[in-house]
Image (cartoon, rainbow, N blue to C red):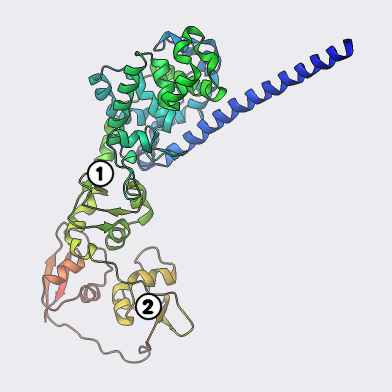
């Protein structure tokens, strides 16, 4: 009997150790996931631009000790639960990491993104603290996407569609901060009403779903409500309450004007035909990856005017060029030249004084982008004596043979205006090509307003 009792007690002891290890692992996994989420925050365009334009903002050494947050009041007495309170300390470390540099960035971003929610929450008579769900759901990252949740509020597709957002293969409005905020506040209003205004339940339902709240019976548990929660859920609530305490304790960053000015560098563009971001990037000579990242709400990288709310975002400085070259952009891109094969002729062109990529490409019947790809050129700058590889389908005259050229003894002057392109200028002058303008002026494809160009007179 004693031996059986001993075995039973030993089994209970080891089971308790196993459960403790499992709880610790679950908590660590939850914290690791939040850490991974926050690591992604600096990568989205607004954060990148802000860090590049405001480097001095991150030089502050005024990083407060974490203990000053512990006794700050928090919304709803239910968040004072010991199960939550004892876990918050690790999230102060998480938010104040790297001598508070992480907090400085998050605080600056919150100055902009919280503004989107404040007026909507107030109009719906909802607690302002609900806006911190943007931090715990996505790390204040409008490009967040994980486990079928996406956008600033980490909405799933069903929630987004319920409140009027488009979510399909061609358009996902969860990545639009203002649209997703309107949907999120509408969802919060519904949850707040259904759960009797109990903020702790609303936060849980927003993060894990109303069904989870009902299944765990935490809406009926009173002060013992945390007993029905998993370790991951307790960690989530600890992260939420820690964020509210930190933001309530530290001074505001006052970076809203700087962030707004960076956003104002972009405009929403609409047009009357389907166009691809790849085509826009090619014609305007923009970085395709950056343009696509700026327009994540277009998963296929294609703007469709049939979607009445659809638009794409473009830097304001390129808007005049977009309109000037719209007739080219809306046409299908020419078929790409296939990769060099053995049957093609490889030519080596030695750059001479006055050569530009446009004139060289025209001479050999290839595209400028192909010249750049074949020779690893990131810009249109070339230098005298440089050897360029060219793959042509038909033989062309070698550089040693005399190539007849046309010399223009007469020319007119033209002053470049805002929005002008070489193609647009050539169309204003009879029988003149962009390549002839480049050759006469010894320039590449890029021009600037106020520049004076010689135009061949034929």
At 43% from the left and 16% from the top, the residue drawn is 245
Q: Secondary structure at mark 1?
A: loop
Q: Residues within 10 Å of mark 1 (few under 14, many from 20)?
A: few
Q: Which mark is residue 265?
A: 1
* Distance from Cα at disc 2 to Cα at disc 1: 38 Å
Q: Secondary structure at mark 2?
A: loop
Residue 44 in view here: yes
Q: What percent of the width, then of the height, locates residue 447? A: 23, 63
Residue in front for this viewpoint, 92 or 237: 237
In the rendered view, does 13 fall on the left or right side of 339?
Answer: right
Q: Earlier in the sequence, mark 2 or mark 1?
A: 1
Q: What percent of the width, then of the height, locates residue 156? A: 39, 36
Q: What percent of the width, then of the height, locates residue 393? A: 39, 84
| Quadrant, the N terminus | top right
Q: Residues within 10 Å of mark 2 (few under 14, many from 20)?
A: some
Residue 249 in view here: no
Q: Which mark is residue 351?
A: 2
Against 202, residue 141 (above or below) is below
At 35% from the left and 92% from the top, the residue drawn is 401
Residue in front for this viewpoint, 152 or 440: 152
* Image-quadrant location for residue 355: bottom left
Residue in front for this viewpoint, 455 or 109: 109
Instruction: Name the mark nearer the viewer: 2 or 1.
Output: 1
Mark count: 2
């Amino acid at each position: 009997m004693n031996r059986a009792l001993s075995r039973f007690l030993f089994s209970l002891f080891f089971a308790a150790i196993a459960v403790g290890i499992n709880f610790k692992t679950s908590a660590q996994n939850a914290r690791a996931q939040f850490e991974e989420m926050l690591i992604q925050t600096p990568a989205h365009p607004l954060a990148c631009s802000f860090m590049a334009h405001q480097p001095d903002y991150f030089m502050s050494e005024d990083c407060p000790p974490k203990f000053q947050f512990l006794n700050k009041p928090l919304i709803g007495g239910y968040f004072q639960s010991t199960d939550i309170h004892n876990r918050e300390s690790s999230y102060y470390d998480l938010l104040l990491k790297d001598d508070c540099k992480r907090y400085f960035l998050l605080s600056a971003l919150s100055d902009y993104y919280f503004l989107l929610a404040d007026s909507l929450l107030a109009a719906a008579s909802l607690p302002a603290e609900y806006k911190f769900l943007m931090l715990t759901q996505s790390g204040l990252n409008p490009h967040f996407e994980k486990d079928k949740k996406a956008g600033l509020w980490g909405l799933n597709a069903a929630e987004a569609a319920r409140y009027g957002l488009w979510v399909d293969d061609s358009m996902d409005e969860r990545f639009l901060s203002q649209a997703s905020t309107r949907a999120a506040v509408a969802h919060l209003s519904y949850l707040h009403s259904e759960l009797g205004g109990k903020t702790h339940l609303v936060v849980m339902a927003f993060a894990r779903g109303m069904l989870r709240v009902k299944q765990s019976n935490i809406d009926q548990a009173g002060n013992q409500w945390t007993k029905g929660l998993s370790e991951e859920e307790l960690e989530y609530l600890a992260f939420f309450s820690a964020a509210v305490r930190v933001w309530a304790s530290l001074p505001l960053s006052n970076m809203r004007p700087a962030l707004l000015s960076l956003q104002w560098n972009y405009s929403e563009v609409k047009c009357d035909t389907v166009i691809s971001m790849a085509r826009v990037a090619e014609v305007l000579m923009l970085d395709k990856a950056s343009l696509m990242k700026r327009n994540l709400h277009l998963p296929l990288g294609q703007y469709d005017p049939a979607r009445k709310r659809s638009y794409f975002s473009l830097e304001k400085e390129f808007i005049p060029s977009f309109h000037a070259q719209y007739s080219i952009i809306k046409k299908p891109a020419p078929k790409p030249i296939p990769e060099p094969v053995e049957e093609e002729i490889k030519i080596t062109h030695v750059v001479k004084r006055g050569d530009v990529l446009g004139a060289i490409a025209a001479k050999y019947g290839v595209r400028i982008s192909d010249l750049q790809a074949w020779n690893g050129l990131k810009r249109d700058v070339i230098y005298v004596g440089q050897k360029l590889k060219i793959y042509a389908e038909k033989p062309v005259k070698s550089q040693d043979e005399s190539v007849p050229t046309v010399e223009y003894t007469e020319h007119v002057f033209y002053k470049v205006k805002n929005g002008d392109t070489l193609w647009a200028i050539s169309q204003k002058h009879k029988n003149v090509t962009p390549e002839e303008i480049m050759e006469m002026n010894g320039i590449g494809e890029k021009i600037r307003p106020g520049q004076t160009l010689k135009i061949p007179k034929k």
